[in-house]
């Protein structure tokens, strides 16, 4: 009959082997997780600065040297507005929206609704076209270009419009 101490030592060794196996499995899982984090961050960077023809176009920033960033082509990601960034960095559809909004935003902070915005862009004021303009205007507002003063009404703060 085995001794109590012998049984305890045997169970201790089994527990130690299990802990070592779990630690090894944990290290492997952590390495996989880190690779996914790095991959996600890399993809986010690439999507934020899409390349056109293998080259990244310079961003036009007032009063600074050009900064390498997204090219202003259809399908480009809308960059977050920051001081000195001009609408020329936006894709053509977004640039046109900013130009129209900048023309209607006087010192009084006039706002434009999406239906009038669609008409100013030369689109028919049908629901499908108005919703497309609303979607783009909301995307611009979410990134700090115009301000959505109330649902569906947009204006451009001084210094953010025109100059494209």
Image (cartoon, helix red, strand yellow):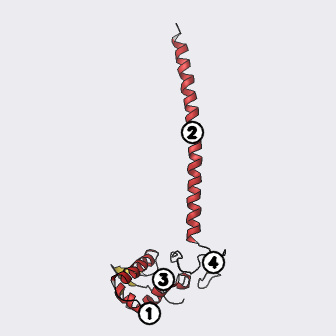
Q: Alpha-carbon distance for marks 1 and 4?
A: 27 Å
Relative side of 133 to 18, left or right: left
Look at discs 1 and 2 and give the one toward the viewer. 2
Residue placed at 48% from the left, 82% from the top? Answer: 94
Look at discs 3 and 1 and give the one toward the viewer. 3
Relative side of 85 to 102, left or right: right
Labelled disc at residue 25: 2
Relative side of 123 to 45, left or right: left
Residue 9 vertical placement versus 73 (above, below) = above
Res. 106 visible in picture = no
Q: Alpha-carbon distance for marks 3 and 1?
A: 14 Å
Q: Alpha-carbon distance for marks 2 and 3?
A: 49 Å
User: 10 Å neighbourhood of mark 3: few (<14), some, or many (≥20)?
Assistant: many
Nearer the N terminus, badge 3 or badge 1?
3
- Quarter holding the C terminus? bottom right
Look at discs 2 and 4 and give the one toward the viewer. 2
Look at discs 4 and 3 and give the one toward the viewer. 3
Q: Are marks 3 and 1 in contact (CB under 8 Å)?
A: no
Q: In terms of secondary structure, where does tag 3 sit?
A: helix
Labelled disc at residue 67: 4
Labelled disc at residue 94: 3
Residue placed at 57% from the left, 33% from the top? Answer: 21
Residue 159 rendering spot, x and y as whole percentages: 49, 86
Residue placed at 39% from the left, 87% from the top? Answer: 118
Residue 57 rendering spot, x and y as whole percentages: 63, 79
Q: Are marks 1 and 2 in contact (CB under 8 Å)?
A: no
Res. 35 visible in picture = yes
Q: Are marks 1 and 4 in contact (CB under 8 Å)?
A: no
Q: Alpha-carbon distance for marks 4 and 3?
A: 20 Å
User: 10 Å neighbourhood of mark 4: few (<14), some, or many (≥20)?
Assistant: few
Residue 135 rendering spot, x and y as whole percentages: 40, 77
Nearer the N terminus, badge 2 or badge 3?
2
């Amino acid at each position: 009959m085995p001794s109590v101490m012998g049984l305890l030592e045997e169970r201790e060794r089994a527990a130690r082997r299990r802990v070592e196996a779990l630690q090894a499995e944990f290290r492997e899982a952590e390495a996989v997780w880190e690779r996914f984090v790095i991959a996600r961050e890399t993809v986010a960077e690439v999507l934020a600065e899409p390349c056109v023809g293998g080259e990244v176009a310079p961003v036009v920033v007032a009063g600074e040297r050009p900064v390498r960033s997204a090219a202003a082509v259809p399908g480009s990601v809308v960059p977050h507005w920051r001081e000195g960034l001009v609408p020329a960095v936006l894709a053509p559809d977004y640039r046109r929206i900013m130009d129209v909004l900048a023309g209607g935003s006087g010192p009084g902070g006039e706002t434009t609704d999406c239906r009038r915005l669609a008409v100013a862009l030369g689109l028919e004021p049908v629901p499908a076209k108005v919703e497309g303009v609303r979607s783009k205007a909301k995307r611009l507002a979410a990134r700090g270009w115009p301000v959505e003063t109330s649902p569906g009404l947009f204006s451009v703060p001084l210094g953010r419009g025109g100059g494209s």
